[in-house]
Amino acid sequence: MQAAQGTAFEVQAVVPTADQMRSLGQRLASLLLAGDLVLLSGPLGAGKTTLAQGIGAGLGVRGPVTSPTFVIARVHPSQRGGPDLVHADAYRLGSRAEVDDLDLDADTDSAVTVVEWGEGLVEDLAASMLAVTIERPGGGEPAAIETGADQDEPRAVRITGWGARWAEAESAVRAALSGAATP
């Protein structure tokens, strides 16, 4: 993480279902502004794209918001005059140079940028960011992940605000998190 910007806060909760994960994304979207960076981390099948779907719905962007694993990045234009959503997946990227080749920073001033699997690769795209880590407390079996059978297993969610943008936003993020989760 971008230690120079400093941790503003960290909050945690358990999100019981995939629908509640999408709802959390919608509530987080109400806090997001053009220029914001959201980094989503967690293992395969944890719920990163599900959260991104909620963010997209909350921003009112043209969809559907699906995993950008094979196209690397998608721009979802706003349908209501708010910021666009840039949804990227850095899973197949191996260096910051490959991230630079995507020109994600070209849209950072006018869009909310959500990056899955971007740890160590995208933190320099913005001075501040929200880092969201999603874990399956029970681990989950690969077969269940592939079939979606574990979609409604609870997920542990940790949201860390980094930098000045989020320095005074802990209570707003905590409120967004508590609406879909239990402490």
Image (cartoon, rainbow, N blue to C red):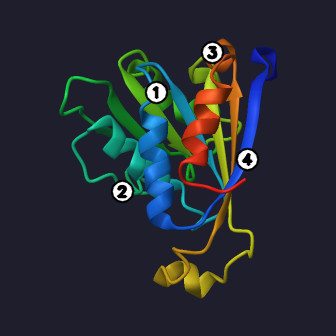
Which residue is painted at 21% across and 42% down in the image?
A: 62
Q: Earlier in the sequence, mark 4 or mark 1?
A: 4
Residue 44 falls left or right of residue 113 = right
Residue 55 falls left or right of residue 173 = left
Numbered tag placed on residue 127 in the rendering: 3
Write down the residue under mark 1.
Answer: 32
Secondary structure beneath dot 2 equals loop
Q: Indicate which label's residue lies in the foreground, 4 or 3.
A: 4
What whole-number distance in Å separates the C-alpha atoms at marks 4 and 1? 19 Å
Which amino acid type is marked by label 1? Leu
Secondary structure beneath dot 4 equals strand
Residue 154 placement: quadrant: bottom right
Q: Indicate which label's residue lies in the foreground, 1 or 2.
A: 1
Write down the residue under mark 2.
Answer: 66
Contact check, label 4 and label 2, Cβ < 8 Å: no
What whole-number distance in Å separates the C-alpha atoms at marks 1 and 2? 20 Å
Which residue is painted at 54% across and 53% down in the image?
A: 180
Which amino acid type is marked by label 2? Thr
Q: Earlier in the sequence, mark 4 or mark 2?
A: 4
